[in-house]
Image: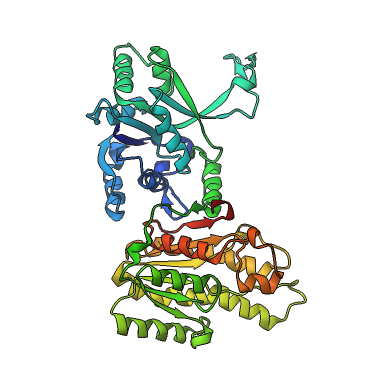
């Protein structure tokens, strides 16, 4: 199998953005754009090594970013050239294996998906060069220097290029060497353009995605932030639950539904599990009860590795007509209870470098009438997780949110009556996915659990 490299170009200045620092170092959703981009390649099972090419003036700034993160695949940090082509060439030439695959990607496209990376690598087994593009939805016009229309190409054959662009290393090295023999500036704008200019190979096109945007203007920062706010992940596959063996797991909301299923599955996987709920004297809206429960577990076990809060209640009705005490209780259980669990968990998880999972709902992306209180508390949980992930990064505590579709739980049946079982998730499936999220290296993410992934 050919080795796969990701070359991330972070050497631009970003003058069009109008910021005092290059756009790859602007923070969006708690991290710099380049950090988001590196993490995409880190998560891909097929990418072996990552090479970063950075502007010389910001080399040490990039070093600081690498030091604070625990990337496992970043093998080189290189100083870029005066142009994108020079930086690309520097990155490519640092790869010794000519039979390797290389994906060249802009650091300021942080919303790249695993599907695009996988498709590019798959295509390289058939083609020597691969581009990524999406269909043009606007009419493309070609203009003269006097700003009059010269021609209007048929839109059905027009596409908008994205990155990564993927190549067999020997081919793209040869293309760059040919470009260096030309006098003056080579009139192409990307690496695939070199392949076509010298007629070296066919370039296969992989379907891109509209969200794979390049951050260029201030409006793009705002858009990216909104996309990150609602972005979610599928639960990572291939995580063996046997990794829970001999770990200490604490579950709040453990007496029924998803919480009860988590307790049973974690025990079957070899974990030492402690479940708490009002039925055994722990109400998460009472911070002192949460504190005492965790303190007792720690005294007995000497460690706490993972903590999960599934406790939640759902009320229905217009705000105007609902009882104020009911509203207050719903907010306390769904939001304040999670805050208390988080606050009391930090000392133990800091010691174990463990992880924490909270529960949200698909209603977090948009408030729902009659369930306004519930949906707003679930939106708050997502915001809480995203902020905590950054706060707790240096403590090496991972915190994520699980977002299950409709699930066959007592709370569901109490509020919506009996529904057809095959239209609902099984609590056991949600439990398995939740435990895999606990074991994930990711933090600050929302993980979807869907019925159609059964």
Image coordinates of residue 32 in percent, x first then y, are 40, 49
Looking at the rendered image, the quarter that the N terminus falls into is top left
Closest to the observer, 449 or 56: 449
Q: Position of residue 104 (x, y in %)?
A: 37, 32
In the drawing, does residue 181 fall left or right of residue 323?
left
Q: Nearer the viewer, residue 318 or 296?
A: 296
Asked if residue 178 lies left or right of residue 445, the reply is left
Looking at the image, is 18 positioned above or below residue 292? above
On screen, residue 324 versus residue 167, left or right, reads right
Answer yes or no: is residue 107 visible.
yes
Q: Residue furthest bottom?
A: 281
- Which quadrant of the view contains residue 191? top left
Quarter of the figure with the C terminus: bottom right
Find residue 40 and report its image quarter.
top left
Q: Which of 256 and 99 is in front in this view?
A: 256
Is 241 placed left or right of 157 in the picture? Answer: left
């Amino acid at each position: 199998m050919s080795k796969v490299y990701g070359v991330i170009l972070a050497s631009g200045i970003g003058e069009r953005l109008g910021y005092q620092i290059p756009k790859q170092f602007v923070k969006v959703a708690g991290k710099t754009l380049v950090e988001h981009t590196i993490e995409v390649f880190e998560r891909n099972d097929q990418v072996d090594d990552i090479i970063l090419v950075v502007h010389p003036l910001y080399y040490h700034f990039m070093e600081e970013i690498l030091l604070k993160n625990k990337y496992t695949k970043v093998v080189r940090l290189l100083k870029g050239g005066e142009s994108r082509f020079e930086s690309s060439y520097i990155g490519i030439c640092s790869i010794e294996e000519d039979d390797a695959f290389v994906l060249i990607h802009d650091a300021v496209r942080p919303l790249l998906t695993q599907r695009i990376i996988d498709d590019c690598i798959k295509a390289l087994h058939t083609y020597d060069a691969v581009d990524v593009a999406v269909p043009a939805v606007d009419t493309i016009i070609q203009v003269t220097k006097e700003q009059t229309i010269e021609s209007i190409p048929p839109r059905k054959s027009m596409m908008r290029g994205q990155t990564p662009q993927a190549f067999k290393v020997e081919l793209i090295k040869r293309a760059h060497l040919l470009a260096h023999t030309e006098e003056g500036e080579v009139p192409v704008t990307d690496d695939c353009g070199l392949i076509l200019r010298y007629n070296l190979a066919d370039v296969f096109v992989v379907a891109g995605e509209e969200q794979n945007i390049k951050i260029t203007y201030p409006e793009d920062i705002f858009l990216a932030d909104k996309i990150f706010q609602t972005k979610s992940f599928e639960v990572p596959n291939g995580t063996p639950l046997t990794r829970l063996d001999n770990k200490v797991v604490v579950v709040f909301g453990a007496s029924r539904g998803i919480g009860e299923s988590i307790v049973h599955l974690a025990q079957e996987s070899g974990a030492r599990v402690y479940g708490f709920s009002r039925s055994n004297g722990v109400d998460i809206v009472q911070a002192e009860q949460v504190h005492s429960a965790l303190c007792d577990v720690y005294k007995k076990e000497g460690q706490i590795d993972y903590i999960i809060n599934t406790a939640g209640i759902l009320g229905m009705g217009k705000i105007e007509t609902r009882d104020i005490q009911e509203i207050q209780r719903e907010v306390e259980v769904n939001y304040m209870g999670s805050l208390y669990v988080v606050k009391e968990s930090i000392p133990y998880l800091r010691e174990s470098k463990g992880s924490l999972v909270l529960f949200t709902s698909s209603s977090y992306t948009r408030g729902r009438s009659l369930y306004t209180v519930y949906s707003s508390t679930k939106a708050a949980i997502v915001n809480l997780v995203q902020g905590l992930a950054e706060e707790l990064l240096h403590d090496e505590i991972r915190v994520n949110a699980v977002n299950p579709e409709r699930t066959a739980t007592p709370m569901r049946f109490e509020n919506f009556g009996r529904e057809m079982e095959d239209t609902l998730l099984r609590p056991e499936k949600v439990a398995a996915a939740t435990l895999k999220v606990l074991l994930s290296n990711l933090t600050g993410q929302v993980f979807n659990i869907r019925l159609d992934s059964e």
